[in-house]
Image (spheres, rainbow, N blue to C red):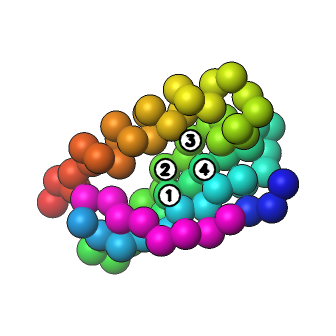
Amino acid sequence: MQVRRRRGTLAGEPGVVLDGKPGQDIGRVVLVGHRGRLYQMTFVSADRSNEAFMLMEALFSTMTGSFKFLD
């Protein structure tokens, strides 16, 4: 599986979403910079053939849709 990169946002900050990150389970990684810090969120299983994929998609949507930076 090849890692796919796309633009994304988290709490209004621009970021990068990497789909297909190899590991024990195929992952989705969100990278966002905010106030000089790099934040990373990792979601598994991002393998569409895994029955847990739909659960991961729901968690991803909930987390990225409701995340706020507390500064």
Q: How far apart are marks 2 and 1 (CA)?
A: 5 Å
Q: Give the range drawn in magenta.
A: 4-11
Residue 66, quarter of the rendered image = top left
Percent position of residue 16, x then y: 50, 69
Q: Distance between the residues labelled 2 and 4?
A: 8 Å
- Residue 43 shows which numbered tag? 3
The first of marks 1 and 3 along the sequence is 1
Tag 1 and tag 4, C-beta contact below 8 Å: yes
User: Residue at position x 39%, y 42% from top?
Assistant: 61
> Along the line of sight, which residue is nearer the eye, 52 or 44?
52
Tag 2 and tag 1, C-beta contact below 8 Å: yes
User: Residue at position x 48%, y 64% from top?
Assistant: 31
Q: How far apart are marks 1 and 3 (CA)?
A: 8 Å
Magenta stretch contains residue 8: yes
Mark 3: amino acid: Phe
Position of residue 48 relative to residue 12, above or below, is above
Magenta stretch contains residue 10: yes
Q: Name the residue carrying label 1.
A: 30
Secondary structure category for the residue under label 4: strand
Tag 4 and tag 3, C-beta contact below 8 Å: yes
Residue 22 visible here: yes
The first of marks 4 and 3 along the sequence is 4
Tag 1 and tag 3, C-beta contact below 8 Å: yes
Residue 32 visible here: no
Q: Residue furthest top?
A: 51
